């Protein structure tokens, strides 16, 4: 998939665990884990906004487009 999810990178930079992010964003651990591992097919803008607020980052810090060759 050409969209790479760098949620784990941003969490590491902010020294935040998945449990802590889950509590602050209001999502289940399972849903955040699916997103973190890149297995998610979609993400709601409201979810992306909440994650960006908590991690104090921009959407581009979490999502990256890599063109396939």
Image: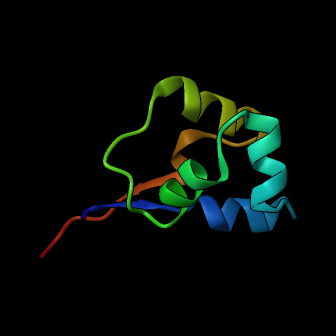
Q: In the displayed image of the protein, which residue is found farthest to the left?
A: 69
Scheme by which the image is coloured? rainbow
User: In this picture, is 67 found above or below 52?
Assistant: below
Q: Which of 26 and 63 is in front in this view?
A: 26
Q: Is residue 8 above or below residue 60?
A: below
Q: Residue 19 at what x, y percent from top left?
A: 80, 56
Above/below status of 25 relative to 29: above
How many numbered callouts? 0
Q: Where is residue 51 in the image (x, y as percent from the top left)?
A: 67, 39
Q: Residue at x 66, y 67 (%)?
A: 9
Identify the image quadrant of the C terminus. Answer: bottom left
Q: Can residue 32 be seen in this view?
A: yes
8 sits left or right of 19 in the view: left
Residue at 49% from the left image edge and 58% from the top image edge: 34
Query: Looking at the image, can residue 61 be seen?
Result: no
Quarter of the image for residue 54 reads: top right
Taking the image as shown, residue 46 lies to the left or right of residue 18, namely: left
* Residue at 58% over, 54% down: 30
The image quadrant that residue 36 belongs to is bottom right
Between 61 and 25, the one lying in front of the other is 25
Q: Position of residue 1 (x, y in %)?
A: 24, 64
Residue sticking out furthest to the top: 46
Judged left or right of residue 46, residue 63 is left
Which residue: 64% across, 66% down? 8
């Amino acid at each position: 998939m050409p969209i790479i999810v760098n949620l784990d990178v941003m969490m590491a930079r902010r020294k935040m665990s998945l449990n802590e992010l889950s509590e602050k964003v209001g999502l289940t651990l399972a849903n955040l884990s699916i997103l973190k591992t890149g297995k998610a097919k979609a993400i709601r803008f409201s979810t992306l906004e909440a994650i960006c607020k908590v991690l104090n980052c921009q959407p581009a810090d979490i999502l990256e487009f890599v063109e396939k060759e």
